[in-house]
Structures are given as structure tokens and as C-alpha cells.
Amino acid sequence: MISAFVFGTCVGSFCNVCACRWPAGESVIAPRSRCPKCLNGIAWYDNIPLISWLVLGAKCRHCKTPISMQYPIVEGLTGLLFLGVYWRFGFVMATPIYMLFCASMVIITFQDLADWTIPNQITLPGIPAGIALSLVGMAWPDSGLRVTDIYDAILGAALGGGILFAMDRVTVFLLKKPGMGFGDVKLLAMVGAFLGWQGTLGTLVIASMVGSVVGISVILYFKHFGSGAEDEDNTEAPPESTEQENTDKSPSDEEITLEGHYLPFGPYLALGSIIFMFVGPEIIDAYFSIIEPSETIMLVD
């Protein structure tokens, strides 16, 4: 168990590298880890997950630039996920596969939060990889994999990509605003390939519920605590050119932009997929155990 956590923190250190370098188009292999401020290389004893951050006091040894909290958070979170996977599945073939799946979701979460992008380096190879692993599940029933039928994996990938793609097109057509980003489309298709069509729907439901709660909470927070700042901003005189600009631009000329409309949905999809990976079958069994008695009563009546 401890080994799973330690291994997870080491993988989490690499997850930080991916989440920071991929958006900039940099290699995750070379150059070696370095301080982004002074560009000095980081020695191995300053690159021990969790421990080095604490020993250094969250500052670069050379230039004393503060080190972001993201680094220990990602390392610790990945370690806990690896520990959870080992505890949930045991020593089976599915364990390393779902450990890597969790690591991928960690990278996706923090890159989407920081850069509003979901890495193709994960989702594009992840879709065929998930479908291929379903063949492993078919050949080895005791593998522990959630999907043991290739048709389930293919349907899950198609359903995942299809649902979000349709939502995006409908939103753009009706509201003239961007809907789901294509990174989310590819992400849910990958999730479907790994977790099947039930995993696709379960992930989407969980992500939507959590996203709604967070979104409503943020709106209420800013309405309550941000009213003073808004009133202060409203006292400023409007720009003289505002009226002229508005009259020159008809609704049909408006461009569809991300500004003011985009909310990163990747982190919620990642969370939903991890939850379903851990307890998806139990959630489905609990759901049917609730509705079956009511159906029986209706039949008797």
C-alpha cells in the first residue's frame, strides 16, 4: 500500500511536467527539470516528491522564487489515487491500467484549469488504447477491467464523443455561443472507451451534477461578496464610443468567441470518470435496487 502511494507521487511529479510543458509545446523529456525563473537545473535531492517542497520552504534553492502549490498537490493527489486503485482492485491486471488512467485525468484536470486546453497527447491515443484493452478483458475475465466487451468500448467511445459534439453544435446554432470544447468531446470518448457506454453516461451525469453545484456556488459567492466591487465599477462613466460601436454591429455580425462563455468542463469529466471507475457498478446496482420495488408496486396495483 505504501509502495503504491510512493510510486504515485513519483508519477505525479511527471504529471506536473506534462501539465506545464505541453501547453507551451515543449518536450517532457528534455531539458531536465529547471527553475522557470533562474533556469538553474534542479538537483535530484531537490526533486523528491512532496519532501523537497517542504525542505526548501516552497522556494527555489538558487533564486528563492516561490514554488507553486500545484506541485505538491498534484504529487499528493496522484499518490492517493494510486493508493485507492490498489486498495479497490488489488493485485490484478487492471490495477496499473487504472493507475495510469487516474494519472491521465490529473494531467487533464490541471492543464484545463490553467490553460483551458485538454492534451491531445492523452485523449487521441487513449481512445484506441481503451478499445484495445477491452479485448484484454474479453480474453482474461479475471483482469479486473470494467469493460470486457469490445462492442461496449466502441459504443462508449462513440456515445461519449457524439453526445458532447451534438451539444456543442446545438448550442452554437441556437445561442450563437460555444458549447462543449472539442477537447471535452475527445475526453469523454476516451472515457467511454475505457469504461463503456454506462461509464460514459455515468461520468456525464456525475460531472454535470458536480459542475452545477460548483457553478451555482460561485455565482452566489460573487453575488454576495462581489456586489460592492460591482457597484464601484458601475460608477465609472461609460466609454464615449460604446453607443456608436453597438449601433454599428448587428446581431448577425457577432462572432462566436470563448470570452465570457467558457467554463472548463474537463476537470468535472475527469472527476466523474474516476468516481465511476471506483464505484460505478455499485452506483448502478443501488439505482436499480431503488426503482425495482416501486415498479413491483405499480404492477400489483
Image (spheres, helix red, strand yellow):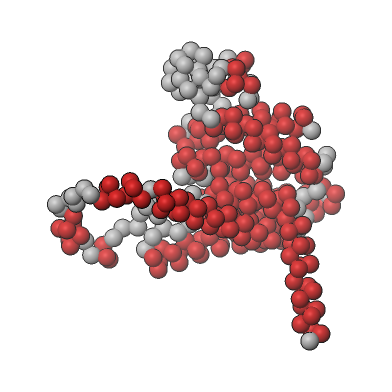
Is the residue 251 above or below the residue 232 in the image?
A: below
Classify residue 18 as left or right of residue 1.
Answer: left
Q: Residue at x 64, y 32 (%)?
A: 76
Which residue extends farthest right?
142
Tell me the quarter of the image containing the N terminus.
top right
Q: Residue at x 47, y 39 (%)?
A: 114
Classify residue 298 as left or right of residue 154.
Answer: right
Residues 93 and 154: in front is 93
Q: Position of residue 282 (x, y in %)?
A: 77, 57
Q: Position of residue 111 (x, y in %)?
A: 51, 40
Image quadrant where residue 11 sits: top right
Tell me the quarter of the image containing the C terminus.
bottom right
Q: Position of residue 135 (x, y in %)?
A: 76, 52
Classify residue 151 as left or right of residue 166.
Answer: right
Residues 175 and 238: in front is 238
Q: Residue at x 53, y 60 (%)?
A: 164
Q: Position of residue 58 (x, y in %)?
A: 53, 22
Is the residue 288 above or below the residue 16 in the image?
A: below
Q: Residue at x 71, y 28 (%)?
A: 6
State whether residue 121 appears in this view: no
Is the residue 74 above or below the residue 205 in the image?
A: above
